[in-house]
Image (spheres, helix red, strand yellow):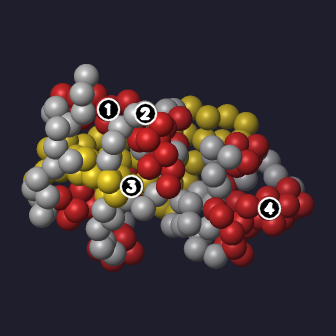
Amino acid sequence: MMELVLASNSPVRARLLSAAGIRFTVKAPDVDEAQVKGAMSGAAARQVAIALSTLKARCASADLEGWVIGADQTLEIDGVMLSKPGEKTAVATQLRLLQGREHRLHAAVSLARQGRMTWRTCRTARLRMRSLSQDDIAGYVERCGETVRHSVGGYHFEEEGIHLFDRVVGDYHAILGLPLLPLISALRRFGAIGS
């Protein structure tokens, strides 16, 4: 069986693959996401997620024999793409924007081998954050702000962030940033994992 590589430093994506019994190594490529997003200014958030997952897979696979998984996730609200908050104070600002409203998470995953794209897909989930008071937001940021500042939504849905929501439509794994079922199906089809 050929080497399987995850082109991502995301601990959540790594946990999902490990929990599914998939053996892999991690090799995150040096991709300037801000530059790609800048070059794609005005593009749909879904297209940006696909482009970034494709670029990551292709870059990481350029000098490898095995299969490389690239993944990316974007968040869109009212047609506007949001970025990771980056700092704890920005988490509160982002949660104030999202609270009481629906947003979309676009999770793209790609497979490449020797620099060539083989397969990709993108799944979209719709999440409605419940109405939150300033105290709710301040409490969440105090407890979780440091750990979620590099999460596209400013929350970890798989942890305490679940309490922020009252309605979700879509694939749980896509919400976490890796559409696992279609990925596993593709890996099987290409012989990258056993059946």
Q: Residues within 10 Å of mark 1 (few under 14, many from 20)?
A: some
Q: Disc 1 marks which residue?
A: 184
Dot 2 and dot 4 residues touching (CB under 8 Å): no
Q: Secondary structure at mark 2?
A: loop
**Residue occupying the point 79% across, 48% down:** 131
Circle 1: residue type: Ile
Q: Residues within 10 Å of mark 4 (few under 14, many from 20)?
A: few
Q: Disc 3 marks which residue?
A: 72
Indicate which disc residue 143 carries.
Answer: 4
Circle 4: residue type: Arg
Dot 2 and dot 3 residues touching (CB under 8 Å): no
Vertical side of 50 occupied by 167: above or below = above
Q: Secondary structure at mark 4?
A: helix
Q: Which percent across, then down, holds residue 60?
A: 22, 62
3D distance between C-alphas at marks 2 and 1: 9 Å
Indicate which disc residue 20 carries.
Answer: 2
Q: First in sequence, mark 3 or 1: give its number.
A: 3
**Residue occupying the point 51% across, 67% down:** 83
Side of 36 relative to 129 (left or right): left
Instruction: Select label 2 or label 3 by which is in front.
Output: 2
Vertical side of 75 occupied by 17: above or below = above
Dot 2 and dot 1 residues touching (CB under 8 Å): yes
Instruction: Identify which residue, 77 or 93, lies in the foreground.
Output: 93
